[in-house]
Image (spheres, rainbow, N blue to C red):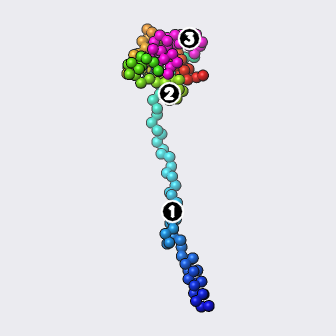
Amino acid sequence: MLRSLMLLFGAAMFALVPTSSLGGTPQQAAPPPAPAAPAAAPAAPVSYPANPVKPTPESQAKAKSLYKMDCAMCHGDNGNGKTDVATSMGMTMPDWSDAKTLAGKQDGELFQTIRNGKDKMPPEAASRANDTELWNLVIYIRSFSKP
Ligand code: HEC
């Protein structure tokens, strides 16, 4: 009888030992609260002039014919850039049939690229396309990703 009581007592002691001292996962302290957002505003993105042009069917028809004469040889009739000229000149072309390509670009940035050229792309002279026509070209190339 005494022996069985002592066994019971021993078992009870064992059960009372905290699990942490038996190799269980120790309780983790709660993480400190996240720091408040920094007060300084992030650097302002470069801002380009907004597109001042409201496209009309006529101005877009003009843009389309300009595009076919001056741009399609490299960028392709559907704007995807998969052209023989691009391949033979070893150029990496943007694919405008994918809306993501131009999503992060402002019209004014595209305007400047067209007017000034970029890498192997020649500039579009004002004698070929005046500013209004060039803004219309920007609108036109954005239309390649629209159904
Ligand atoms: C000789 C081939 C060639 C011709 C012609 C050409 N481009 Fe390009 N264009 C390129 C190449 C190559 C790039 C990529 C330049 C780079 O990012 O390095 C490019 C880039 C651009 C970009 C920038 C796109 C972006 O995703 O940032 C625009 C906009 C553009 N072209 C418009 C035009 C327009 C409009 C015309 C016609 C007036 C034209 N291009 C004519 C080769 C050409």
- Outermost bottom residue: 2
- x 53%, y 71%: residue: 19
Residue behind label 2 places its C-beta within 8 angstroms of ligand 1: yes
Q: Residue at x 54, y 73 (%)?
A: 18
**Residue corresponding to mark 2:** 101
User: Badge 1: few (under 14), some or many (20 or more) residues near its Cα, within 10 Å?
Assistant: few
Q: Could you tell me the amino acid type at mark 3?
A: Ala
Q: Which residues are magenta?
A: 55-81
Residue occupied by mark 3: 61
Task: Name the residue furthest top.
Answer: 127
| Count of labels in the image | 3
Question: Helix, strand, or loop for circle 3?
Answer: helix
Give the number of the disc on residue 28: 1
Foreground of the two, 140 or 53? 140
Residue 115 image-quadrant placement: top left
Q: Quadrant of the N terminus?
A: bottom right
Residue 52 shows in the view: no
The relative height of residue 94 versus residue 69 in the rendered view (above or below) is below
- Mark yes or no: residue 33 visible: yes
